[in-house]
Amino acid sequence: MMVEHEKLCRHLARFFMARHLNASFGESFPTVPGRMTLAALTTGARARTAFQRLQVQTVAELGPLSVKNLYDVRGTGQGTVEEVVTALVSAAVIRAGHAPEDAISGEDASFTNTAEASLSPAQAQLLEDLAQLAAWHHLRRRSSHSLLNVIVEDGAPEQIQEVALRLNSLTAADMVTNVGAPDPILEFTAVLSELDERQLRILRDRFLGRTPKKLTELAVEFDVSRERVRQIEVRLKDLLASTFHFGTCIGNLLASLRAEIQPIAALDRLIILHPDLARDVPGVDVPLWLVLDRLDEHFEVSDGWAAAPDVNAAREQTRILLEDFATEHGLVDLAAATSATVMPKAELLSWLRWCGYVVYNDQILTRTRSLNDHAAGLLAATGEPLQTDELHKEMGRDATIRSLTNVLGSDGRFVRTDRSTWGLASWEIEEYTSIRQQIGLELVAAGGEIELSRLVESITSRFDVSPSSVQAYAGNGEYEIIDRVVRRRVIPAAPRKAPSATRRLFRHGDVWKLRITITRDHLRGSGFPVPAGVASLVGCAQGEVVELDSELGSQSIRWTGLQPASGTIKRFLDQLQAMEGQTAFLEFHPYGRFCLTVQEPVAAGRDPLAQALELTGAVGTGDAERAKAILAAAIDLPEDAKPRRILVAYRQRGDDDIAALLEQVWTRQRHDWTDQQATGEERASTSMEPVGLDPPGSVATSEGDREPHVPYRRTASAGADDVTQDDGVLQEDSATVWVPVPAGYRSVGWVRPHEAEAAVLAYQLHADVPVHDGDEITGWARYVDGASTNAFDLQANVKLVRTRPQGERITCWIKEHEAFSVTQAAAEGRSVAVTGPDGETTGLVEYYQPDGEEARRFLSSTRLLRGRRPN
């Protein structure tokens, strides 16, 4: 029952205020003498100011009033009313009969102080209010901030302006004189010392533990019920909350933290502001910030952040704040967001990144959940078009460049500003569609015809495309070039390869099957190119899109670029649980139907005829004649076609893997041949080893790049970069400039990167393509149909030639995958292996630094080598 008098009276006053709001003071405190002056009560300046405004001086005059009447007085709040009621309770406890006479008359010694007595109640309250305000500023570490902001007229007397200046310069440091502030740790440990052992254990293990124990665990330890433990916990919380109210050291610290956390603050910054937060509290062995976190339900601390009321709510408030500032593409200016919060800029940046926002160029990207929203925000933050690879790199997402391109192309917010550059449609800049469409626009603007040079200049000056690409499109498809003038084609262009001549495309009755190897891009959902024979098969002309029916929705075949392409087949692969590296057949059925099947890899060592059938998508058969008929029909030959005709047809189509298997069945075993040797004089003049090749007329092996052999020749007058060609192989011409060839390879020659680019385009267009070196045409990539003798013998459809004053000179015959490898080596600045259609390494492209001796001598940074064939 031991309790301080003042503390007891304040608790009783709070009960009275909560339960007797309208009860009169006279009826509630009858033992307090009515003749007692209010000045004799133990009240401060705030209460005396309220008495003055009520115009009451004695307890009897206060008697008819209630708590509610006090709240109605101007400037009176919870603290003032509590102060008045506490004084009345104290007077009632003491009783008038035991109080000194001078207390009743109001002549208490505490009011005899002449300095305080000379002040009116309002003046005394002003000083008390300034002192409390100064204490708050001192607590918030703003001791140097001004307490007042007094404004006077410009024309006020100088003395008044000086008064305003003095008042405005008044700071918390001027008012707070107590240097030795109370210690919150001591204040908390003092409370802990009054708890019994069980209360202390529950407080430490249940309430303040970093990993609080369960009620059941504590109940077992104390041999009580779970409900009893919960009751003790609730009482402890109530005790701590009522003990550490505002005015206590810990209560003041909690109030400061609440003001700082709006709605989030870094715990590190709070510790810098209040170093006591990092101190451990004896008895519970946790830092003070954790104690305050558990004491106050207005905020929580999680992962280094103090949030009000919790981290999820703070994150949501941040989202709402940013949405108010966001532009149409979800951008928020970082400076604007910083000005709207109390957090320092660095802390705000850390919080935004913790929430998952992207900050780029001092702009906050609020919409990055989807690929297209992220791209739109990044472009808007950049303010200018970006190349696809740059945009992909800046986004840093787990998506392929092809997927990003597909997303950009299907979203109306984006426009292609160049061949591989994207911008926002809202910028209203010139849109790049495709070279073919740009040519169409130029023809419309020019009245239907335009000179080739003018067309090339107009398009290449505005977009990043090569002159050879413009010229290739201008002479193919719906356009044609006549006497260096481009116009729309009047007579339709001859179709490309028929389905029956298309590699890996086979016919089985009314169904055509295209064999592919499943790649990671297929599994990710990317589209992919298909041969022109497939487009012809489904009736897709250049510039068109055809939709095929399937059990899993429509399947698109589009020919909007140089080469036809198929839409994604991911849904089919997912249904079949296909894996990378497996063989699949795209099946094209009558009446526009489509489906996909997956086949296990062809087992090595089996009957070659059975393996060949499986590669065409047919079911194996033990009847050799039936197998021959199926293989013939698969490429649209009569079922009774001779084996050699079938073999030649597969070779011409480029199905070398199938042709190699058929050779094992239909051709006799070859004996070793002796290479034709160059004469000693020729050897000495060239300082080169002859390349061993099969004898003329032999059938090529499965590698598919043996050529009839003709010995090397050289011309004495050739220049440093001159080469001679006899068997499709480009030969270096001078013994003094010979660059050694690695073991196991033979030199095809120094194929320049722009020559390889023209060769790739020639394979795609099935047409001759000029080789451009700047604005000058230095040669041609001549396309030869597969039925040509040279193309069949050399297993290449493109012949590179260089123009000279005396005419064209053959450089070499180059295969499509070799041309791709040369362009890859030049683009990546390194040597790369040449991989054939069947995945085997067939050669090497050596890369030389452009400023090196070899590159300058042969005017090329790339040399193409083919693997040697055994004798």
Image (cartoon, grey):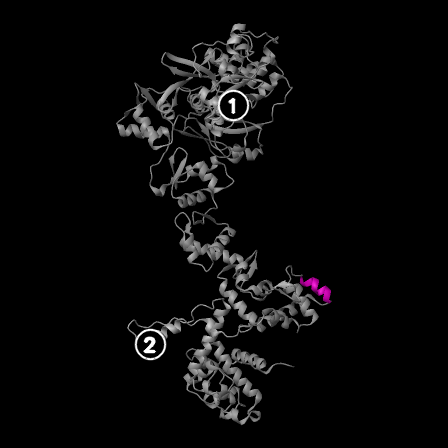
For the N terminus, the quadrant is bottom right
Residue 692 image point, x, y percent: 56, 11
Vertical placement of 238 versus 675: above or below? below
Vertical placement of 277 versus 365: above or below? below
Residue lying at the far left in this picture: please name it: 447
Does dot 2 land on a helix, a strand or a loop? helix
Mark 2 or mark 1: whose residue is earlier in sequence: 2
Residue 146 image point, x, y percent: 42, 69
Kindly identify which residue carries mark 2. 159
Vertical placement of 554 versus 492: above or below? below
Kindly identify which residue carries mark 1. 846
Kind of residue at badge 1: Glu
Vertical placement of 188 versus 6: above or below? above
Asked whether the viewer can see residue 636, the reply is: no
Q: Which residues are magenta?
A: 214-222
| Pointer 2 local density, CA inside 10 Å: few below 14, some 14–19, many at least 20 | few
Residue 221 image point, x, y percent: 73, 64
